[in-house]
Amino acid sequence: MRVVIAEDSVLLREGIVRLLAEFGHEVVEALGSSDFLLEAVIKYEPDLTIVDVRMPPSFTDEGLRAALQIRRQLPAASVLVLSQYVEERYAQELIASGSQGVGYLLKERVADVREFVEAAERVASGGSAFDPEVIRQVISRSRGLSGVSSLTPRELDVLALIAEGRSNGAIAKAIFVSDGAVEKHITSIFMKLGLAPNDAEHRRVMAVLAFLRDS
């Protein structure tokens, strides 16, 4: 996997470079700002671009706007946002750019380096990786819609975990219920959202993201 990184913190940037190298991946460009990020992606055609949200010069949303620009200009490019913050409007727009090859993880909630690398690999291969908190906050912007407003708090938790890419068994362990209970929740979620259930994990994630994209 060939990767381009845009992260203003030199310690974190170099840490990600070394971490990815340990797992056999190559960082072809590591930038401290988003100024030339699009140019780097066009030049190197990486399998994945990892970008922070708040970068120089204003430290507001430069990185995320650059990520959106990449997705608009290069729809097939895989982008993983790694940030301390959930920018709800931009997160929703990022999802709207397509449900494949996109992710949004929160730095403070990345507790396992192997899981982070697996998430990066999943996004690079066309999958999705979203922190549940990102999904919850994006969903909260759509609570006025009849389908979303009808979801129970437990169903919202399950929906967030589905979007994170977890299997039924993993969801069951996370919320301390049986696999059968998870299946019932998923069936109910898709019925309320008007989405056809599908057994394939990536198809389920795509369906959830498609709903969020259109919300």
Image (cartoon, helix red, strand yellow):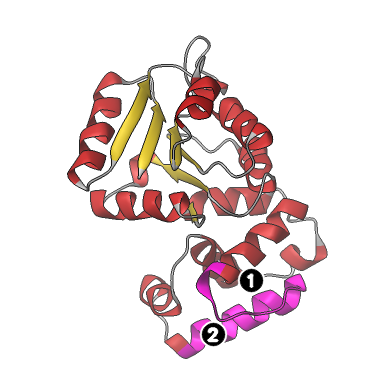
* Secondary structure beneath label 2: helix
Residue depicted at 77% across the width and 54% down the height = 214
Task: Decide: few, some or many residues near mark 2? Use Cα within 10 Å; few <14, some 14-19, many ≥20.
Answer: some
Residue depicted at 54% across the width and 61% down the height = 163
| Residue that extends furthest to the top in the rendered view of this protein | 57
Q: Is residue 199 visible?
A: yes
Which mark, by number, is residue 183? 2
Q: Is residue 57 left or right of residue 1?
A: right
Identify the main secondary structure in magenta: helix
Q: Which residue is mark 1?
A: 152
Task: Decide: few, some or many residues near mark 1? Use Cα within 10 Å; few <14, some 14-19, many ≥20.
Answer: few
**At which x and y percent is residue 57?**
50, 9
| Extent of the magenta region | 180-202
Residue depicted at 56% across the width and 32% down the height = 67
Please tell me whether residue 77 is drawn above or below residue 148 in the rendered image. above
Q: Quadrant of residue 14?
A: top left
Q: Quadrant of residue 144?
A: bottom right
20, 141: nearer the viewer? 20
Q: Nearer the viewer, mark 1 or mark 2?
A: 2
C-alpha distance separating marks 1 and 2: 15 Å
Residue type marked 2? Glu
The N terminus: image quadrant: top left
Residue depicted at 46% across the width and 51% down the height = 123
Residue type marked 1? Thr
- Residues at circles 1 and 2 in contact by the CB criterion of under 8 Å: no
145, 48: nearer the viewer? 48
Please tell me whether residue 194 is drawn above or below residue 55 in the rendered image. below
Q: Would residue 194 be counted in the magenta stretch?
A: yes
